[in-house]
Amino acid sequence: MTRTIALIDVNNFYVSCERAFNPRLKYQPVVVLSNNDGCVISRSNEAKALGIKMGEPWFKCQAMARQYGVEALSSNYALYADMSNRVMSILADFSPHQEVYSIDECFLELTGFAQKDLIAYGQLMKTRIFKWTGLPVCVGVGATKTLAKIANNIAKKNIKFNGLCNLSNIKHEELNHLLHAMEAGEVWGVGRQLALKLKARGIDTALDLKRADPVYIRQSFGVVMEKIVHELNGTLCIDLEEVAPPRKQILSSRSFGDAVSDYQSLAASITLYMSRAAEKLRGQQSVASVIQVYIRTSPFKLDQAQYSNSMTIPLPTPTDDTRQLVKMALWALKRIYKPHYSYVKAGVSLGDLISKASMPLDFFTSPDSSDRSTALMRTVDRINAKMGRESIKLASEGFDRSWQMKQGNKSPNYTTSWEQILCVKDKAFSF
């Protein structure tokens, strides 16, 4: 049986989330900025038309923004994560086999839906998601994940497809015409650097890549690129991952809104980042065997003294207990911290992660102690999930957050905070 896979992607996801709750932004050029309002990470079509590029530093765009009335918003990650969960929950009703690929993308297995009109089925997905969340999506359908990604790209860029492209029911010649119009670097898994190497070998377009010799591609670029060639020819080589594999490493870091030099502020930030990392660790039922802590000054301020350092510590016993992880992280921080420097970033990472269920026993940790730790962390996570993040936290996290990243124009947490929920009065939104 020929496989049929759909890729559903939310258009301009971060901007679309903001527009769903603020109709004033519709048809207006809008961008969403990264941490500390540094770079552009999401753009409306109107902002793209003005020439604002992805990843461009915001300070370079401000003159244009004032001239054309571009609305710049700080990232609201809580809102985006919640809206993503809603979209993925809706899509789960359309197929029993689903791979959540990213915060705004999802693969669905539609192989068993051959009796359906997939164009109508895809339009039903689009309609329901927009009706229930206010988010616009595009749907691409193909015989492989790579072709589904290409179909989605075509649906997004060509108005005649009305946001939905099914490559499985178009003629071979038309498919080749569409692939000829697409650069090789636009193919999923290729990227800019690899595209330059392909171009040097005469492979400029997606059609050129489809027609390339798989053996030659494998010898020159590796097995992943060989799989992409097969997928462009309709042979499935990259299957759906319905259960996301556990992370092998967990990172948590942020740039500070303002540079800090005192140890107490660094300790508070390290406690916060490690608490967040530990929560993610428990969420995937893993324990960490190694932690790393790092701090650094700004490499761009050459008129200031420069310093950066990190320390990696193997733990005597793998753990997911926030208290133990923070204790070791602060121990490391004391040894790498130097006063009189202006630090702009700090972070932690958890490494050598293993499943908690397969954690080896040791002679120095009693079962009762381990059980109490597990029960305590589970209780803390439940309370924070129900009452709000940081309802319970370690004292070393402190209450002074003057060092936190800048979010000068952040929208309310419309869907995750009762205090910030939208109120409707006299048919007008009240913020």
Image: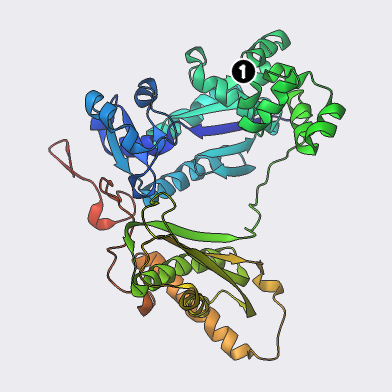
Q: Position of residue 109 (x, y in %)?
A: 66, 36
Q: Residue at x 45, y 76 (%)?
A: 379
Any part of residue 341 in sight: yes
Q: Could you tell whether 211 is left or right of 380 in the image?
A: right
Quadrant assignment for the N terminus = top right
Q: Position of residue 371 (x, y in %)?
A: 58, 84
Q: Which residue is mark 1?
A: 182
Q: What colour scheme has been applied to the protein in the rendered image?
A: rainbow
Q: Could you tell whether 132 is left or right of 145 in the image?
A: left
Q: Position of residue 281 (x, y in %)?
A: 56, 66
Quarter residue 311 falls in: bottom right
Q: Could you tell whether 327 is left or right of 247 in the image?
A: left
Quarter residue 146 falls in: top right
Q: Is residue 201 above or below residue 334?
A: above
- SS state under label 1: loop
Type of amino acid under label 1: Met
Q: Residue at x 73, y 11 (%)?
A: 172
Quadrant assignment for the C terminus = top left
Q: Could you tell whether 195 is left or right of 396 in the image?
A: right
Question: Which of the pair 296/248 is nearer the observer?
Answer: 296
